[in-house]
Image (cartoon, rainbow, N blue to C red):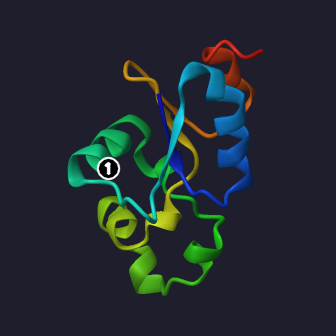
Amino acid sequence: MKIYGLKNCDTCRAALKALAGHGAVLVDIRDTPLDDATRARFLDRFGEALVNRRSTTWRGLSGDARAGDPASLLAEHPALMKRPVIDTGSALYLGWDAGAKAALGLV
C-alpha cells in the first residue's frame, strides 16, 4: 500500500501511522514526483477533485496559471495535489476522512 502525499503533512502522517500495520509506505510527491502514468490514473479516478484549491500553493498562482489543465498544474506544482492519495493496489482513495477509513477497515 502506498500513501502519496508530503512527509510534513499532518494528515498524511496520520494516515501513515494508522496504516503502518498494513505495510503502508509514504511516497513524498516533492521528493519523488508522480510519473505521467500515475498522475493520469489519479486524474481518471478523481478528476478535478485531485487539485487542492484551498492550498497555499493554489492561492499563490496567477489567474492564468489556475486556468491550466489539472495534469499540467500537478506536474508543475506537486503540492497542489489533495492529500493523501492512498493506493491499495486494487483501489484508490482521496483524503483521510471517515469514508476512506471505513473503506480501509479502520472504523
Residue drawn at the location 40% of the way across and 45% of the way down: 47
Q: Is residue 93 above or below residue 53?
A: above
Residue drawn at the location 38% of the way across and 59% of the way down: 32
Amino acid carrying mark 1 in the image: Arg
User: Within 10 angstroms of label 1, few (less than 14), some, or many (20 or more) residues?
Assistant: some
Q: Residue 104: percent from the left, percent from the top?
A: 61, 17
Q: Residue 34: percent from the left, percent from the top?
A: 33, 54
Q: Is residue 24 above or below residue 26?
A: above
Image side of residue 54 versus residue 87, left or right: right
Asked where in the image residue 78 lies, by quadrant, the reply is bottom left
Q: Nearer the viewer, residue 64 or 84?
A: 84
Q: Residue furthest left?
A: 37
Mark 1, residue position: 39
Q: Residue 15: percent from the left, percent from the top?
A: 67, 37
Residue drawn at the location 45% of the way across and 24% of the way down: 88
Q: Residue 92: percent from the left, percent from the top?
A: 45, 29
Label 1: which secondary element: helix
Image side of residue 19 versus residue 62, left or right: right
Q: Is residue 100 visible?
A: no
Image side of residue 39 versus residue 49, left or right: left
Q: Is residue 92 visible?
A: yes
Q: Nearer the viewer, residue 44 or 38?
A: 38
Asked where in the image residue 69 lies, by quadrant, the reply is bottom left
Residue drawn at the location 36% of the way across and 60% of the way down: 33
In the rendered image, which quarter contains the C terminus?
Answer: top right
Q: How many marks?
A: 1
